[in-house]
Amino acid sequence: MKRVIFLLLVILAVAASSQICSYQDILDYLNLTTDNSVFRLTRPVLDHTRPTVVHLDVYLYAILSVIEKTQTFVPFVWCSMRWINERIKWDPAHFCGIDRVSIPHEMVWKPDLFIYEMIEKDDSPKSPYLFLYNDGSIFKEEGLRIVSACNMDVHKFPFDTQKCNISIGSTLHCSEGLKCLKRTNKKLYHVFSFFLSLILSPPSTVDELLLQPFSNSSRATQFSKELIRIHGEWEFLHLLVSKSNLSYHDRLWDQLVYTVTMRRKPLLHVLNFLLPVLFFLTLDLASFFIADHRGEKLGFKITVLLAISVLLLILNDILPSMSSRTPLIATYCIVIFGLMLLSVLVTILVTYLLEKDAENLQRESWVDGDNTVKADNTKEEEQEHTLCSCISEASDAEKQHELVPISEEVSSSIQTGETHVLLLILDELKEMQKTLRVHHSCRSKGKYAMWAARINGAFFFLYVITVSLFLPLLYMEWTSETQ
């Protein structure tokens, strides 16, 4: 008899050790099927007064885009949630030690969480499954591409630091605090009936859904820095996890707020925008060394001004149309554009004064030339002496070697008695004398030329002083820490 019992025990042990279990056995035990709506229709609590606590974690995986023009922040985050379904529980010892099973997420109830800043529907692929644990815990992970609104401060663009929030909360289920008030009296709008209802039938309070973070800020930041793959032009700095409440009428909702702090990498904007504007400013300063009586100076300045205008159009496509504070880069461009515009206006004024001075001196030279012709007609025997004196006074060092042979030729012609040839030569010399006087008058400085030189020098001095003060002050404001 003892041997029989021993053999039965051995057979049972072998049978138990060779037991085959499957995930479907657990689902059959729980009666968890697609046709059973018990697990997905209502909040998974046995007592409606008990809240459903949802533990949530969000980690930053990539910064896809930050659009200043539309104030839009597009990250890709990894989100994990865990909550308890009180209707689900099994003993792993009865199912070969299986303590979790994956099922389609449509089979059970899920928290109705959404992101308050989201302005566009998420079109990223969703994970079709979630995990059920033997203690009733449900664990779900998925990646989200979030197109969210972000109030950006571009005052220090491109040396700015932005903070964008991702606020997660329930759509319908409220939480503690004011809580969800269930009123049975429909006449609560009347004051007397309201207080009477409070005395006779006080409102019952129910905590429906509470949100709790898995990780604190330091852990979320560290894990996000290890997980992140795409930065773009931004450097991820910190992920702050905080909890807040949203109240509306007599209801209060739990919120978890994840604040992403990121700093822009300014090198691209410095090379493509700030330095070219500074180079154009340097060219405009260098244009003051071009001669004023030439037309190239004015044309050069207008060309530089048009180049700055093209860069301003590019800046207009980057910055938002509305901002609480004027961006410093806009101040930088407008001040430099204004200085160049004033430089063009001053150049126009100086050119006008020089032309007016040249006209006056030319008029005076023509009057002097007419008087000289009359004197030459009355005193023909002194033409040679007058001619030589005019040549010596009007000509400069470059023209003297041309007039000396001519005067010698005149002297030789007079000595030979060729009067007709002499008169022709004298007429040509008179015309040359007038031309030299006009050329000399252009080089001389009259009243208007003196004023033009003073205006040009004073404006150049003010230009240099303004640029020397403006650029360091702007750099100090750009690099100062935001309070």
Image: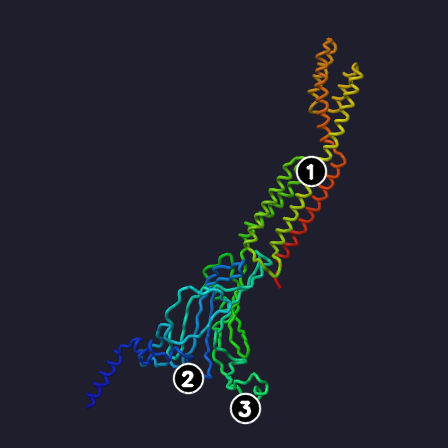
- Of pointers 2 and 3, the one earlier in the residue sequence: 2
> Which of labels 2 and 3 is toward the front?
3
Q: Residues within 10 Å of mark 1 (few under 14, many from 20)?
A: many
- Of pointers 3 and 1, the one earlier in the residue sequence: 3
Residue 333 on image: x %, y %: 61, 51
Disc number at residue 46? 2
Quadrant where the image shows the N terminus:
bottom left
> Which of labels 3 and 1 is toward the front?
3
Work out whether 196 lies above or below 375: below
> Which of labels 1 and 2 is toward the front?
1
Kind of element beneath mark 1: helix
What residue is disc 3 on?
200
Asked which quadrant contains residue 302, the reply is top right
Alpha carbon distance from label 1 to label 2 = 93 Å
Residue lying at 71% horizontally and 36% vertically, measured from the top left: 354
Kind of element beneath mark 2: loop
- Of pointers 1 and 2, the one earlier in the residue sequence: 2
Residue 434 on image: x %, y %: 72, 24
The foreground one among 273 and 362 is: 362
Q: Which amino acid is tagged 2?
A: Leu
Q: Residues within 10 Å of mark 3 (few under 14, many from 20)?
A: few
Residue 338 on image: x %, y %: 65, 49
Q: Which amino acid is tagged 1?
A: Thr
Quadrant where the image shows the C terminus:
bottom right
- Contact, CB < 8 Å: mark 3 with mark 1? no
Residue 6 on image: x %, y %: 22, 86
Alpha carbon distance from label 2 to label 3 = 28 Å
Kind of element beneath mark 3: helix
The foreground one among 202 and 17 is: 202
Q: Which amino acid is tagged 3?
A: Leu
